Amino acid sequence: MRLLVQEPPLQYIRAATFLEEKLVAGAAVHVADLTLVEAYFALQSYYLLPKDKSLQMLAAFVNTPGISVSCHALAVLAMPGLATAKPGFADRLIHGTAHAAGHTLVTFEKAGKNLPDTLVL
């Protein structure tokens, strides 16, 4: 969050310094899908950004050199029209995790019918 919103300033500086040190050392910093979802909702609920702006910020962030995310997070964030897609960002990440593990996603989310290997109850 601190790298996305650059506040509070001291925490942003600490996070940016940490990332820079990792990059200089040749290491990547992995950001978990759950962390991306948490940031997505925080950008909307706390920082009052609309969905499309929140997703744009996350997409730019995950494409920052030295930031590593799951392959399905990259694919979902690259989707055109994601801000209005059904199912949305969080559900698509959940689906990506299940699909990558070879599992069928079981959900009550009616829009899940639009995703492969998904059973809507």
Image (cartoon, grey):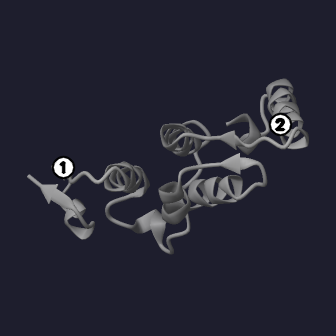
Q: CA distance from mark 1 to mark 2?
A: 38 Å
Q: Is residue 39 above or below residue 107?
A: above
* Upstream in sequence: badge 1 or badge 2: 2
Specify whether 96 is left or right of 105.
right
Amino acid type for the residue under numbered disc 2? Lys
Q: Residue at x 73, y 35 (%)?
A: 2
Specify whether 48 is left or right of 23.
left
User: Toward which corner of the image does residue 53 lie, by quadrant?
Assistant: bottom right
Q: Residue at x 67, y 37 (%)?
A: 1
**Which residue is at the far left?**
121
Q: Residue at x 43, y 55 (%)?
A: 89
Residue 75 coordinates in the image, percent (x, y): 51, 65
For label 1, the SS is strand
Residue 102 coordinates in the image, percent (x, y): 29, 54
Q: Which residue is mark 1?
A: 107
Q: Residue at x 77, y 48 (%)?
A: 66
Residue 11 coordinates in the image, percent (x, y): 80, 26
Specify whether 30 is left or right of 36.
right
User: Toward which corner of the image does residue 9 lie, by quadrant?
Assistant: top right
Callout in the foreground (1, 2): 2
Residue 8 coordinates in the image, percent (x, y): 78, 28
Frontmost residue, 44 versus 3: 3
Amino acid type for the residue under numbered disc 1? Thr
Q: Which residue is mark 2?
A: 22
For label 2, the SS is helix
